[in-house]
Image (cartoon, grey):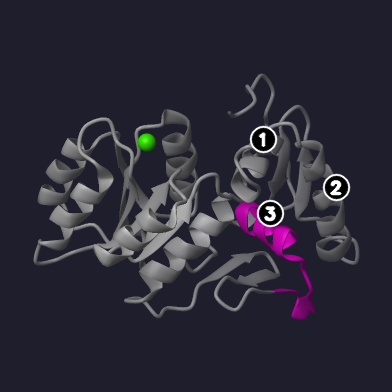
Amino acid sequence: MANTETNKELMRILVVEDEERIADFVCRGLASAGYAVEHTPDGRGALDKLHEVDYDLVILDLMLPDIDGLEVLEKVRTRKVSPAVLILSARGGIDDRVKGLELGADDYLVKPFAFVELLARVRALIRRGQPVAEKLVAGDLVMDCIRRKVSRAGEPIDLAPKEFSILEYLMRNRGKPLSRTMIVEHVWDMEYDGLTNIVDVYIRHLRSKVDDRFPVKLIHTVRGVGYMLDPAGRLPSVAGQAEPE
Ligand code: CA
């Protein structure tokens, strides 16, 4: 393992969300960002799990099929060891926001949201107790996720925010082909289904900044799939592999 991941494998996140698509999108994203993620679709399940496990963070939907999310939050806050809580809700009303924060939520994100925004907030909440620098390394490419800086062979590279997010996603999954859909879902709003072509545009920008000046190319096109970052400069065998969705 070339990259120096921090203690994130110890970071446990519980996702309480009944909408399957959102739960799946959030869980997959957090897992690929290196967190240990568990999911439950209702409030009862959440209370059971919270009883058994000390989570570092709970991502809590408000409109659940059984118990209201705010009620779950209230119960969480009466516990002695209480995890950070990020409320995730379609309710954007000031009342809900205020009520959630009054009841002790640490942050509040309104749907629909971009995964990067969620990830930034998750990191901020988890970092409160974990002031460890986080660095990703792939060959001579180095990314400082906290300071949002990238360099290759010691030369700093300036990236726009979306370019940074795509590169970070590729670096965290290096050696693994990622489909355009996966990249869009990770970096843009999850509603942007039809915009996979934009990925090609951003990859072009990234290549001009990260690869063009260097003999070893890190960003590879994987035919029929999408893109992959590989510091060894080799291509994986993807014959017959279905597009990962
Ligand atoms: Ca819901």
Pointers 3 and 2 in contact (CB under 8 A)?
no
Disc 1 packing (10 Å; few <14; some 14–19; many ≥20) = many
Q: Nearer the viewer, residue 172 or 75?
A: 75
Q: Nearer the viewer, residue 96 or 232?
A: 96
Indicate whether residue 27 is drawn in magenta.
no
Disc 2 packing (10 Å; few <14; some 14–19; many ≥20) = few
Above or below — where is 161 with respect to 144? above
Residue occupied by mark 3: 166
The residue shown at (29%, 36%) is 64
Residue occupied by mark 1: 181
Ligand 1: quadrant of the figure: top left
Amino acid on which disc 1 is placed: Thr
Left or right, 113 with reference to 203: left
Disc 3 packing (10 Å; few <14; some 14–19; many ≥20) = many
SS class, disc 3? helix
Q: Is residue 10 visible?
A: no
Above or below — where is 175 with respect to 97? above
Q: Which residues are magenta?
A: 150-170
Could you tell which of marks 3 and 2 lies nearer the N-terminus? 3
Q: Nearer the viewer, residue 167 or 79?
A: 79
Above or below — where is 243 with respect to 142? above
The residue shown at (30%, 62%) is 105
Q: Nearer the viewer, residue 114 or 184?
A: 114
C-alpha span from label 1 to label 2: 14 Å
Disc 1 CB within 8 Å of nearest ligand 1 atom? no
SS class, disc 2? helix
The quadrant holding residue 183 is top right
Left or right, 69 with reference to 176: left
